Image (cartoon, helix red, strand yellow):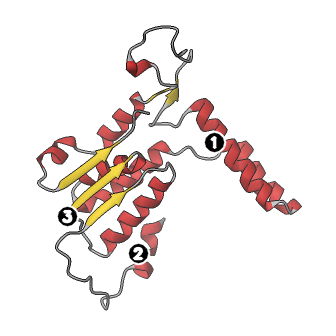
Amino acid sequence: MRNELEEISRPSDAFAMPRYDEIVLVLQGGGALGSYQAGVVESLAQARIEPNGIAGVSIGALNTAIIAGNAPENRVKALHGLWNAICRPRDWVANAGAWMLPYAGVNELVRKWTSNWAAGRALAEGQPGFFVPRFPLPLAGFDRLDPARVSFYDTTALKATLLKYADFDRINDDRRRYLAYTPPY
């Protein structure tokens, strides 16, 4: 795991952070980009760089909640927990394609095929700890439904996941500035 590489990747003592009045971490949206952001937060923690404020939108807002909802020494572990909870491991079909087809010299085809397979599974099955498809699907305009029931996906699981990895009392009591916006999924 990445922590095993800590000795190798720890910044040298020669690095000196320039003096800034404010350091603000801004995390944008974009699905898988959120797991990359978790790695950036881990690197900042290893360099002992502590932001004064954090802002996030969409998937970046989920990471913002985890960062803001944990003490600095617990943030990386909580982010790992979140991303392990909401990412689906490859199934046997994707594994077979990833291992067998490159030997046939079709690496680009394999990458596209396994990406499309994973995206199709997410659309059809959802992501654990994040969202599941609603069945039957809502039909727009044919009935007046509660706004929470008109989306194609039910995000109830996401609330439970966030409550597991973020302390919202800490977020509300902290004097730092946090701004998070998630569009209605």
- Mark 1, residues whose alpha carbon is within 10 Å: few (<14), some, or many (≥20)? few
Q: Which mark is residue 119?
A: 1
Q: Where 175 sits versus 7, above or below?
A: above
SS category of the residue bearing label 2: helix
166 or 119, which lies in front? 119
Q: Residue 6 carries which label?
A: 2
Left-right relation of 32 to 159: right
Q: Which residue is drawn at 20% across and 81% down?
A: 19
The amino acid sitting under disc 1 is Ala
Furthest residue in direction top, as rendered: 143
Q: Is residue 104 visible?
A: yes
> Which tag, 2 or 1, sits closer to the chain's start?
2
SS category of the residue bearing label 1: helix
The amino acid sitting under disc 3 is Asn
Residue at mark 3 to residue at mark 2: CA–CA distance: 25 Å
User: Percent position (x, y) of residue 23?
Assistant: 24, 69
User: Percent position (x, y) of residue 117?
Assistant: 70, 42
Q: Which residue is drawn at 29% across and 38% down?
A: 163
Q: Report the residue marked by disc 3.
A: 52
139 or 91, which lies in front? 139
Q: Residue at x 35, y 33 (%)?
A: 160
Quadrant containing the C terminus is: top left
